[in-house]
Image (cartoon, helix red, strand yellow):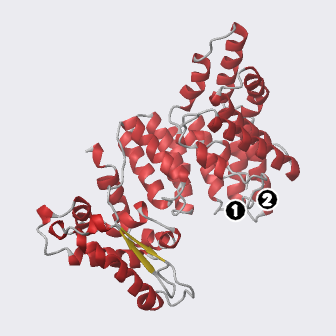
Amino acid sequence: MLRRTFLFVCLSFVLFEVLAIRSIVLSAQSTESLQDLKEKIARLTDAQRLTEALPLLQELVSREPSNADAYYFLGFAWMAEASNVRDEAARKTLRIRAREAWMKAKELGSRRDILDGLIATIPPDGSTTRSFSENIEAQAAMIEAEAFFGQGKLQDALRNYQRALQADPKLYEAALFSGDVYNQERDWAQAEKWYQKAMEIDPYREIAYRYSATPLMRQGKLDEALSRYVQSYITEPYSRFAQSGLLQWASAAKVTPAHPAIEFPIQVIGAGTAEPKVATNPAFVDKPDDGTSAWLSYGPARVDWAKKTFAEAFPQEKNYRHSLAEEAAALRAVLKTAKEINPKELHPSLAKLKKLDDDGLLEAYILMARPDEGIAQDHADYLRKNPDRLRRYVMDVVLASRN
């Protein structure tokens, strides 16, 4: 897909991206002509005229080959150029160049949270996975709109996004990118209207929540922006983009997000096989006075679940997998074994687990802090049934330092 995720994710992740662009200017130490070049780049990028900025960015990286920020923005410019090309082979080439520019920025030491996500979303061969819409008219309008947006022709882009949405009323990106146009024009009310429209079309995609936080941040509405970033994160917690959005807010609010530091001294290998293995740290679990010996219940509980309970709990699945239900059952087996210990004497890890369980947040903790490939498959269902618990976990536990 020709995705705005690639092209204009800076609108959603980096609150003061223009200031980051300006940092290229402020770091200039060379000739006046180089300074002028950087000023032109800043003006064009600020106006989303990325295709016009492309040759200037190419010149800048040739003159300053160690400028990580220049390569970072060069990647966006290459993606904007790709949206103007009809030939798929040529688009792939341009997307590859964008990926290479972002990889170069990382190699040069860029620490932008979003960078790994940008690189990961473009396959090495520059290919895309799908189009915007199966509706031919909507697809054509979106392609035109993206090309106009990359050229900074915002009203032409908006007209085509609206045309696409009329042809395909369920086209999430058409509503989302309409919000982007108004966001770029600083018409916050209209931007909010269209971001809300995207959320209505598909409440289980994180992008609109994240994008809608940008105008709120620009208006200094940190609490409202936090609500959107949290919703983005709980909707797709394994997305680097959603994670980076929350980190962006935390940086602005001077908050340090963190999952509870809980030590797991038990590891189960091959729980669903004929010969599962349970590895323990004897030095950790051989302390009955603080309840840590209760961890010895974890391995057998998981092995028993794999042998007996999984097939009953998931009759529609042919092959065993580590599930949220299994992990929660095993941790509760540990807590049950340790229940005779005075809560004040419990090992800190067990005390934290107990509090999470008492607060109804154990499953949320597992999904958000300790997912593996199997557990992650249970996230979507849990989100639909327990969104409030996921939000509460992030607000009260991950962002506890904000209080």
- Position in image of residue 333 (x %, y %): 28, 79
Q: Residues within 10 Å of mark 2 (few under 14, many from 20)?
A: some
- The answer, for residue 156, to whether it is visible in the render is no
- Amino acid at dot 2: Glu
Q: Which residue is mark 2?
A: 137
Residue 7 position (above or below residue 321): above
Q: Measuring 56% from the left and 43% from the top, which residue is drawn there?
A: 114
- Which one is in front, 85 or 292? 292
Q: Are marks 1 and 2 in contact (CB under 8 Å)?
A: yes
The extreme top residue here reads 32
Q: Measuring 36% from the left and 37% from the top, which residue is drawn there?
A: 253
Q: Is residue 357 left or right of residue 63?
A: left
Q: Earlier in the sequence, mark 1 or mark 2?
A: 2
Q: Measuring 60% from the left and 26% from the top, which residue is drawn there?
A: 21
- Position in image of residue 168 (x %, y %): 69, 62
Quadrant, the C terminus: top left
